[in-house]
Amino acid sequence: MWVPLNEYRQPTQIPTLPQWALPKAASVGKAHPSFGPHPAAVQRGPIDQKTTARIEGFQRSLGSLIYGEILWRIAHARRANEIPNAQLQGDVAEAMERASRGIHKAGSLAEQIGDAGFIAILDRLQIKSMTTIPRLDALKTLVAELEHEAARLAA
């Protein structure tokens, strides 16, 4: 069976199994722990609107791909206003702050090594621009490559 995935490689729709393929507990009305998109329920609680606004502010600087990856990895949310509680909001904001520092570091290192070196590294990593970095691991690799090149040029 084909299951369509979104850009975060998550199913856009959870397929339903035929009755014969379901565990016996499911057929008699008991819930099976693996049913549903999230195996464990996340407690909903109070949220902080200022933190929501702060998280939304990161979308422009991080780019939509990294922004979405952080939201999904930490809070299983697609938008900042879907984060279920203040604890997860804080975790998301912290992760976005770290990623933002990585973006800023990459920018300052790019200035140090110059346009030609920077573009060569982006090409080698198959990154089109700073706003289209596809994943957090690609950002980490980019920063490491830029640091290496800056150190090489300084020596």
Image: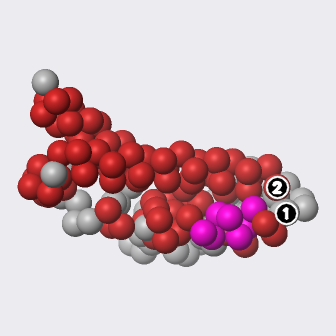
At 25% from the left and 51% from the top, the residue drawn is: 111
Mark 2 to mark 1 CA distance (whole Å): 5 Å
Quadrant where the N terminus lies?
bottom left
Answer whether labels 2 and 1 touch (C-beta < 8 Å). Answer: yes
Query: How many residues crowd around disc 1 within 10 Å: few (fewer than 14), some, or many (20 or more)?
Result: some
Q: Give above or below for 5 relative to 22.
A: below
Q: Give above or below for 51 relative to 25.
A: below
Residue 102 visible to the viewer: yes
For the residue labelled by badge 1, is the local secondary structure a helix, a strand or a loop?
Answer: loop
At 84% from the left and 63% from the top, the residue drawn is: 48
For the residue labelled by badge 2, is the local secondary structure a helix, a strand or a loop?
Answer: helix
Q: Is residue 67 magenta?
A: no
Q: Which residue is mark 2?
A: 86
Q: Which residues are magenta?
A: 51-57
The picture places residue 137, in percent across and down from the top left corner, at 37, 45
The picture places residue 61, in percent across and down from the top left corner, at 47, 65
Residue 15 visible to the viewer: no
Q: Earlier in the sequence, mark 2 or mark 1?
A: 1
| Predominant SS of the magenta segment | helix
Q: Amino acid at mark 2?
A: Ala
Q: Which residue is mark 1?
A: 47
